Image (cartoon, helix red, strand yellow):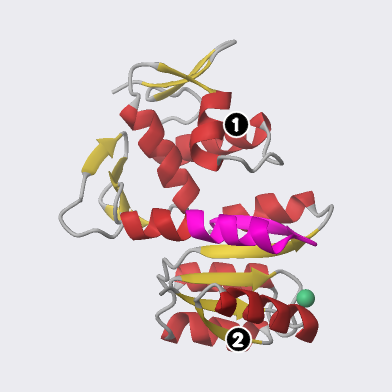
Amino acid sequence: MAHLLIIEDEPAMQLGLKDNLELEGYQVDLAGDGEAGLNKIISGKYDLVLLDVMLPKLSGFDVCRKARTAGVQTPIVLLTARGEEIDKVLGLELGADDYITKPFGVRELLARLKAILRRSQAATIPGNEETVSIGRLTVNFNTFRTLQDGTEIKLSHKEVEILAYLYKNRNKVVSRYELLENVWGYEEQITTRTVDNFIARLRQKAETNPNNPHIILTVHGSGYKMVL
Ligand code: CA
């Protein structure tokens, strides 16, 4: 069963999450502040981390950024407060894989966790590797390892999933809604603007001249097309 780490400072929330996740059969560890959480992420072998944003000592954002800088690729789900739209965008930019807004229902949380665990487990099946070149990037869609001009860089899971979807449908037009449906699924809070933001970031990484893209093209009124 998957081994989860919960980094959360509110005792009621911490114990509620732990109880519910253990009932589902997960093995759960706890950390009560950002510093302790980061140490555990780096030293532990977790399958997934639930990370509160507002934490003592180190914020969830700092924990996320430092973990990614240290090379940790464990999926991270941020717990954000309602209305903090900026948190979501910033969190994803810092390398979080997903976020869930407080207050949330247990069913929603479990569905989200299962989806992420399924994706990351599918990604680590040995012999299932596929490395492709997309402009300046060389991407392994299964291990998420990415090189830019031969130097390793970190892409978030969502960024790799978008690249994988565009690659699978290369030389065809993919609408924003198709990307939303296939990459984000039922997370209805995500808008087409989020898709556009991700595309802009991917262009920065993949294109020689991001302002004049040759690989991830905008098809006006329709969506995007990866030309390879
Ligand atoms: Ca908190």
Label 2, ligand 1: CB separation under 8 Å? no
Picture coordinates of residue 139, whole percent (x, y)? 29, 46
The secondary element bearing badge 1 is classed as: helix
Closer to the camera in the image, 165 or 207: 165
Task: Kindly state the secondary structure of the residue where label 2 is placed.
Answer: strand
Residue at 44 percent of width and 24 percent of height: 213
Confirm whether residue 207 shows in the render.
no
Q: Relative to 148, say whether 33 is above or below.
A: below
Q: Is residue 109 magenta?
A: yes
Which numbered disc flags the more N-terminal residue, 2 or 1? 2
How would you rate the neighbour count of disc 2 (Cα within 10 Å): few for under 14, some for 14-19, many for 20 or more? many
Residue extending farthest right: 83
* Number of numbered tags placed on the structure image: 2
Label of residue 196 in the image = 1
Is 52 left or right of 25, judged from the image as shown? Answer: right
Marks 2 and 1, how far apart at CA: 36 Å
Amino acid carrying label 1: it is Asp
Q: Is mark 1 within 8 Å of ligand 1?
A: no
The spot of residue 36 in percent (x, y) is: 60, 89
Instruction: Name the foreground residue: 143 vs 136.
Output: 143
Q: Is residue 64 magenta?
A: no
The segment highlighted magenta reads: 97-115
Judging by the rendered image, the residue that carries numbered circle 2 is 30
Packing grade of label 1 (10 A; few <14, some 14-19, many >=20) is: some
Q: Quadrant of ligand 1?
A: bottom right
View extreme (front): residue:
23
Residue drawn at x 15%, y 55% is 127
